[in-house]
Image: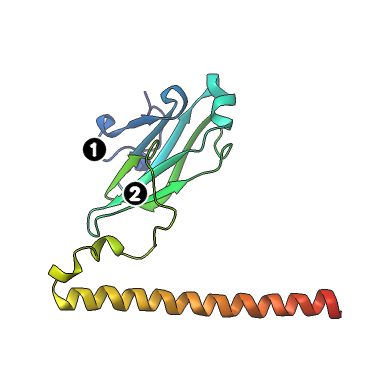
Amino acid sequence: AATAGVPRELLPAGGPEDVVRTGPNGCVALWRSSASHCVIRTQCTELVESLANYSVSFLCFDALSGERVRHVFDPGAFDAEETFDSEIVCTRCEDADGVKVSRVASPTKLANFRGWKKKDPKVVNSILTGMYKEVTELKGLVVEASLAVERLNGQVFDG
């Protein structure tokens, strides 16, 4: 069984029927725990080489925002036998194998912005305010990174 020996707090919230099998020959299990975290369990002792070349991934669905966020782990990130609590809170944890995600997807809540002409102006304002805050924060990070590069250049080339 996918959940045999798993600590109680990491067991599937909805029981064994909530476990999704994925990965090489289904040796990777995914579910949402009672703490609403996505949990990944590998049982791949006979498929170590296949697992080493496989990118474990899942989609975190948030019912409140309607967003799905894809989380991808590098090939070789998991042991053949491992239970991993991602500590990522989700309404539902979904298999991401074969799901195409746009490379230009924004981390903002653009899913809520679709159909904005039909939305309450207060909702649109709230979404735009959130985007403005994100852009402002990104500008600050760019300034910090630029200053750090200048300091490094000074140490490397002037020092």
Marks 2, 1: nearer the viewer: 2
Q: Is residue 7 above or below residue 116?
A: above
Check disc 1: other Cα within 10 Å, few if <14, some if 14-19, many if 20+. few
Q: How many residues crowd around disc 2 within 10 Å: few (fewer than 14), some, or many (20 or more)? A: many
Q: State the image coordinates of residue 90 (x, y, percent, origin top left).
A: 31, 51
Residue reaching furthest right? 159
Q: Which residue is mark 1?
A: 14
Residue at x-position 23% and y-position 54%: 63
- Colour approach in the figure: rainbow
Q: Position of residue 10 (x, y in %)?
A: 37, 41
98 vs 12, left or right, is right
Residue 13 left/right relative to 150: left
Q: Position of residue 47 (x, y in %)?
A: 54, 22
Residue 26: quadrant of the picture: top left
Q: Residue 60 got which mark?
A: 2
Q: Nearer the viewer, residue 113 or 144?
A: 113
Please say if the residues under marks 2 and 1 sit with CB atoms less than 8 Å apart.
Answer: no
Q: Amino acid at mark 1?
A: Gly
Q: CA distance from mark 2 to mark 1?
A: 16 Å
Tell me if residue 42 comes above or below residue 47 in the rendering: below
| Amino acid type of the residue that numbered disc 2 sits on in the rendered structure | Cys
Q: Secondary structure at mark 2?
A: strand
